[in-house]
Image (tube, grey):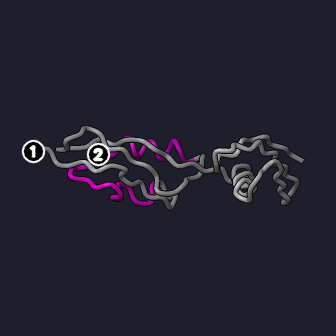
Amino acid sequence: MKTYEITCIQCPLGCALTVSVEGEAVTVTGNTCPRGAEYGKKEVLHPSRTVTSTVAVEDGVLPRLSVKTKTDIPKEKIFDVMEVIRKTAVKAPVKAGDVIIENVCGTGADVIATKTVEKAK
């Protein structure tokens, strides 16, 4: 049996979770709500993260645009996703919520703008 000690980040309580894995069985203790149990199981079996960064903006009132993945991506894909984001530039205007990169690195997650950037005059 493998045991992991992790802190739940699903709410401000920050419960100290103990996640035990034995074969296909996963047991989570220490959670005060069902979200903690789901988080503990997912974090041990299939960890994922939301990636936030910036991309270059051409002809905009700002030089950079804040972006994020619309959904979590597998943790092991973070560096691949960041490499694609680093090479990306957009042309102003851009609205918050616009898709900047579709299905980044085959993760199924789009990279979206989190801010509106107007075209420079």
Is residue 90 one of those drawn in magenta?
A: yes
Give above or below for 110 relative to 76.
below
Q: Which residues are magenta?
A: 77-104
Residue at image x 86%, y 45%?
A: 2
Say whether residue 68 is left or right of residue 60. right
- Residue 60 rendering spot, x and y as whole percentages: 19, 44
- Residue 24 rendering spot, x and y as whole percentages: 84, 60
Distance of label 1 from label 2 (alpha carbons): 19 Å
Q: Quadrant of the C terminus?
A: top left
Q: Amino acid at mark 2?
A: Ala
Say whether residue 52 is left or right of residue 48. left
Residue at image x 33%, y 43%?
A: 55
How many residues crowd around disc 1 within 10 Å: few (fewer than 14), some, or many (20 or more)? few
How many residues crowd around disc 2 within 10 Å: few (fewer than 14), some, or many (20 or more)? some
Q: Which residue is mark 2?
A: 89
How many numbered circles does the render carry? 2
The answer to which image quadrant residue 5 occupies is top right
Residue at image x 45%, y 60%?
A: 103
- Which residue is at the front of the view, 58 or 79? 58
Q: Amino acid at mark 1?
A: Lys
Say whether residue 34 is left or right of residue 48. right
SS at badge 2:
strand
- Which residue is at the front of the view, 85 or 3? 3
Is residue 86 one of those drawn in magenta?
A: yes
- Residue 8 rendering spot, x and y as whole percentages: 70, 46
Say whether residue 45 is left or right of residue 103. right
- Which residue is at the front of the view, 40 or 101? 40
Q: Disc 1, disc 2: CB below 8 Å?
A: no
Q: Which residue is mark 1?
A: 121
